[in-house]
Amino acid sequence: MSKLRRREALWFYLFASPWIIGFVVFLLGPMIASVYISLTDWDSFTPPKFVGLENYTRLLTEDPVFWKALWNTFFYAAISVPLGLGIGLWLANLLNKQVRLRKVFRTLIYLPTLVPLVATAMIFKMVLAPSGPLNDVLGVFSIPGPSWLLESIWVKPALILLSVWGAGGATVLLLAAMKGIPRELYEAAEVDGAGPFRQFWSITFPQLTPIIFFNLIMGLIGAFQVFSQVYILTKGGPDNASQMMVPLLFNEAFSFYHMGYASALSWLLFAVILVFTLLAFRTARRWVFYETEVK
């Protein structure tokens, strides 16, 4: 390697060193440590006792709460992620039209994503109360409102309703992508007699699929790691009907001090997220459209 190349490499590692040190110390190091901790019985106060795969065996064969939390998390992700994508796409399509006060509407749609999640959860706790505004609105139509956060059948729909509150982030990305679609494509479609729905399905949607795919991946990861909403609103109740993977992990680690068990749970959660992410990438070839230059 020439002297100039060595000097460039030195400057590269010098400027990249804050990130490299931070990654090794705060991410890679704890990940490696958690692998070892997951193979031990450790309460964080006494020396860890090596137990091998006992924590994983107990999770998969002896802990019914784990399977219930996994099912609740999967149900939450399966409903909230497609619903959020659909609402974001619908809002972006509406906000892309030439209407009055369009900038005001765009601002209002994005504002909920700027509100801290804890504050949002507290607001929804009041809205979803038995005597809250939502049940008052239902009462106007003579519909008896349930106790959203106290009944097993309604608690998951209530959490899914809260997840839709943050659809503005996906809307902004989709709206920006819509602005990048060449107008000539729509003009050519109009000449061929294509209506608004046909234009959306044949032009707009294919051009948006990379952004939709990005939102899908981020939505899946976020849904499987949902924590604040559950912890603030329900604590996993009633009767574990809203218990999710991360709140369960938090309780095992910091309420019961089962650090080894919680570490095993975190790695199983990592495996679940990895599987669903890989499945999403596997299916992406069939529906995600990437425009390429033909040379």
Image (cartoon, rainbow, N blue to C red):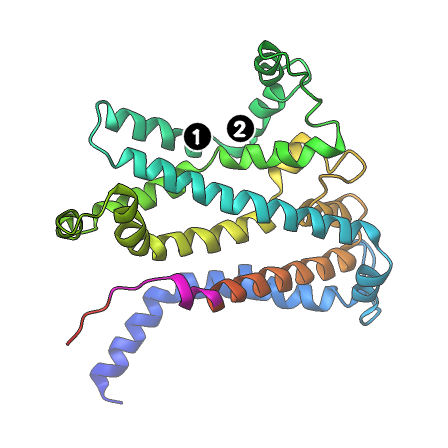
Q: Quadrant of the N terminus?
A: bottom left
Query: How far from the left and from the top, in percent, is residue 78?
Result: 58, 49
Image label count = 2
Q: Residue furthest bottom?
A: 1
Question: What label sits on residue 112 in the rendered view?
Answer: 1
Question: Disc 2 versus disc 1: distance between alpha carbons?
Answer: 8 Å
C-beta proximity under 8 Å, tags 2 and 1: yes
Q: Which residue is rendered at x = 73% and y = 48% of the image? A: 69
Please tell me in which quadrant of the rendered image residue 26 appears: bottom right
The image quadrant of residue 235 is: top right
The tag on residue 120 is 2
Image quadrant occupied by the C terminus:
bottom left
- Badge 2 density bin: few <14, some 14–19, many ≥20, Cα 10 Å: some
Task: Determine which of the numbered discs, if any, sits on residue 257 in the image.
Answer: none
Closer to the camera, 192 or 219?
Answer: 192
**Above-or-below relation of 273 to 254:** below
| Relative to 32, 110 lies left or right | left
Q: Residue at x 33, y 45 (%)?
A: 173
Question: Residue 74 at what x, y percent from top left?
Answer: 64, 51
Per the rendered image, the range of residues in magenta is 283-291
150 above or below 62? above
Q: In the displayed orientation, state which residue is furthest to the front.
A: 193
Dot 2 amino acid type? Thr
Residue 34 lies left or right of residue 168; in this view the side is right
Q: Earlier in the sequence, mark 2 or mark 1?
A: 1
**Amino acid under disc 1:** Pro
Q: Position of residue 210 (x, y in %)?
A: 35, 57
